[in-house]
Amino acid sequence: FDSELDGHVAIVTGASSGIGEATATSLVSEGASIVLAARRESELEELAAQIEDEGGEALIVPTDLTDDTDIDALVDATIDAHDRVDILVNNAGLMPLAHIADVDRETLQTTIDVNLSGLIKLTHAVIPTMVEQGSGHIVNLSSVVGRFSQPNSSHYDATKAGVIQFGESLRRDIAEAGIRVATIEPGAVNTELIEHIPDEEVQSATEDLFESMEQLAPEDIARTITFVVTQPQRVDINEVLIRPTDQV
Ligand code: NDP
């Protein structure tokens, strides 16, 4: 590889499927050394093998973002291996859509823990290294629903709106240190995300909605993220709302 991200180290969370997997592959194709984080170790191993077969470099760190120890271990393993962190893609998330009256408290908690608390804590854990470097790029996955709310989605929408506000406020705190922050807000993307919706009725309605349009591919988001992180240091693309052309 001989490209824009040569020598750059990128952590991607939720790298075991969907947008995270596609983003890891795309960043590697631009020369980045990748650190793959998610809970499913076998999926990470498979992706790492694929990346290595193609001449790239991948470190896997099985991580549950609801666990503070895992968050610290992810950053420590990255620093031990590479001594730096240039890019953090906070992509991991879950979308257990349901009417607020039908969702159990544990699901509410996990949604907030992964989509928002985990994202904030992991960012907090990499910032000192990025400040020391005088550079870094944080890319946070929000959603179109972070801006335009949907029914049966209050807990999910709240986390995604929180990601937008966290990103903008964070940017104002760390811009002077040369650290960039981008918020990506996708519409419908064809991944396994909706397969994990526990409420059958809501899942089937969401499937119908997604199938009513030509959904984005995970690679469309990966290409966008790669575009964002390969800009010159003076360019900070703060927010990208990206939807299928026929999503209205
Ligand atoms: P996937 O379900 O394919 O990916 C979700 C990823 O999050 C998986 O790799 C999963 O890995 C990881 N994850 C879930 N829980 C945890 C946890 N506790 N600790 C660590 N990792 C975890 O869906 P997408 O690729 O679609 O989703 C990626 C992001 O994009 C999410 O934040 C989602 O909200 C956002 N998004 C998706 C849209 C879509 O239409 N698909 C639209 C807008 C935003 P594992 O299970 O191995 O831990």
Image (spheres, rainbow, N blue to C red):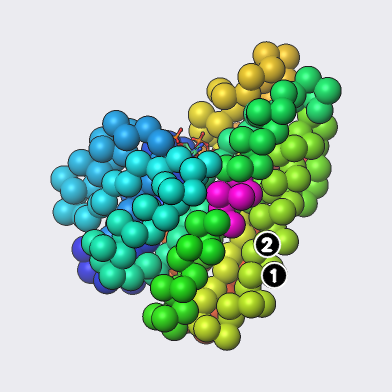
Quadrant location of the N terminus in the rendered image: bottom left
Local SS, label 1? helix
Q: Nearer the viewer, residue 121 or 42?
A: 121
**Residue 233, position as x, y percentages in the image:** 47, 81
Q: Residue furthest front?
A: 69
The magenta stretch spans residue 108: no
135 is higher (above) or lower (below) than 181:
below
Does the rendering let one see residue 6? Answer: no
The magenta stretch spans residue 116: yes
Residues at marks 2 and 1, CA–CA distance in whole angstroms = 5 Å
The residue labelled by disc 2 is 166
Left or right position of 71 against 212: left
Q: Residue at x 82, y 32 (%)?
A: 151
Q: Amino acid at mark 1?
A: Ser
Q: Which residues are magenta?
A: 115-120
**Residue 213, position as x, y percentages in the image:** 65, 32
Magenta: main secondary structure: helix
Left or right position of 177 against 105: left
Neighbourhood count class around disc 1 (C-alpha, 10 Å): few under 14, some 14–19, many 20 upward: few
Q: Residue at x 53, y 41 (%)?
A: 66
